[in-house]
Image (cartoon, rainbow, N blue to C red):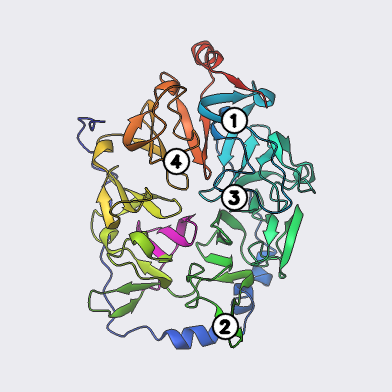
Amino acid sequence: MPPKKRNPENGDGQQVKRRKKRKEEVDFEDDHDAVENNESAVAVETYEEEIGQIDITLEGSMLSGELLFSGGTNWDLVGRHSLPKGVKTKGGPNLWGPHRITNMVGIKVRTVSSGCTACHCAIITKEGKTYTWGRNEKGQLGHGDTDRQDLPKQVESLSTVNIVDVACGRNHTLFLTDKGQVYACGDNKMGQLGLGHQSATVPSPTRISYKGPPIRRVACGGEFSMMVDIRGNLYSFGCPEYGQLGHNTDGKYFVTSNKLSFKCEMVPRKVNVWIEKSRDGRLTPIIDVEVREVACGASHTIVLDSKKRVFSWGFGGYGRLGHAEPKDEMVPRLVAFFDGTNRGATMVAAGSTFSFALNQYGALFLWGQTKPTGEAAMYPKLVQDLSGWRIRSIGCCNKSVVIAADESVVSWGASPTYGELGYGDNKPRSSTTPQEMKTLEKLYIHSVACGYGHSLFIARCDTEEDQERLNKLPIFIP
């Protein structure tokens, strides 16, 4: 797909000034020891006196439209070679093109959510109702049971609160309210629900006991979670195996001489250390980080701050951290490519083994690996095929990518796929290069979200013409 012939815009004219480098190196041991005996970030910094005076109302997306779905619906088998013990599949086809969903036709949706490791979905309607469906072996749908749902079903226990955002991990889900509170459900074996204990299944949304400033962003990796408060502080909890929590540890310890285990973070803990690392290995602390956006892969985290800088940490395999080396990072490390005048980013996204950033001029950069075989990009590289496109939404599957840009939706991904690329029946089922999704031609897509092997779309439905085009799409009836 050739790039569009369009000159890049000049952005907002703002320049990010280079901060003066401090010469001293980071003493990680001191920082780690300072917080090692605290179970959470709240114990390090107490906001109780002030928090009682903070009354906020977060707003969800102001845009809404009709829900469309493309991808695998055999939720029990997606991403698996065989069924887990005790699980019986109900089957389900791969939908190779976008479909309307039978019980959501005519209902306006403002938020769609899933995750690159998730085989379940969540949506928020214009009226503020929260629905979930898909795999539910750990209670991640929040319906109080572990029954698979093939159609969106309202989460009744959240009907008394106003949910504005949702994040989906492999088998767990976080729900953010308009008051900055977070509810969690699903798998909690690694403490990824932040409830202060480890248990196999929490099937109903349970409020995280957190006393800091109100939360305004949530994100989920495979078995870990992230929260951002209104002051830009970042908190993490769950599995620390590759350093993805950012606390300068992978949490490993020996239970016996030959049995390894992990010390998981069971409650939200503040990420305190942010660094820059030079080519010769010299470390410089960064003390003025205010987090704006956070995205999680299977075992890595990527952050965008208020100065348009990008940080990444966790599992470094296949170059997904963008530091030109495949090493794991235990604390947030500055991605040097986006540091400096006129080099800042405005959006970040993460797949299981890759990462994206959109720079301030609208150019899209990718690093890591998006296909099972082949060379990995160890540092950010321009996605040439999308040069000149105005990108507004990025969805990352396990290996595939779906992007809403201009009047189109573009996708690509290597085999095997489940229909998440949306090319349609009797069309190619994979592509190693970006291709326009002809099945959505002339339909304007506000936003996209992706799961392990599926894609969710919010399609504009404001005019009769929009509705006529929607009516031409097939309706999925399980």
User: Where does the image place residue 463, in percent across and percent down from the top left?
Assistant: 52, 15
Q: Nearer the viewer, mark 4 or mark 2?
A: 4
Residue 129 visible, this angle: no
Mark 1 and mark 3 residues within 8 Å of each other at the beta carbon: no
Up the image or down, 443 lies above or below 210; here it is above
Q: What element carries label 4?
A: loop
Q: Is mark 2 on a helix, strand or loop?
A: strand
Residue in view at x 64 percent, y 52 percent: 173
Q: What element carries label 3?
A: strand
Instruction: Name the image quarter holding residue 20.
Output: bottom left
* Residue holding disc 3: 168
Query: Mark on residue 93?
Result: 1
128 or 240: nearer the eye? 240
Mark 2 and mark 1 residues within 8 Å of each other at the beta carbon: no
Mark 3 and mark 2 residues within 8 Å of each other at the beta carbon: no
- The Cα atoms of the two marked residues, 3 and 4, are separated by 22 Å
Please state the extent of the stretch shown in magenta in the rendering.
Answer: 286-312
Mark 4 and mark 2 residues within 8 Å of each other at the beta carbon: no
* Residue holding disc 2: 253
Q: Which of marks 2 and 1 is in front?
A: 1
Closer to the chain start, of discs 3 and 4, is: 3
- The Cα atoms of the two marked residues, 1 and 4, are separated by 15 Å
* Residue holding disc 4: 416
- The Cα atoms of the two marked residues, 1 and 3, are separated by 22 Å
Closer to the chain start, of discs 1 and 4, is: 1
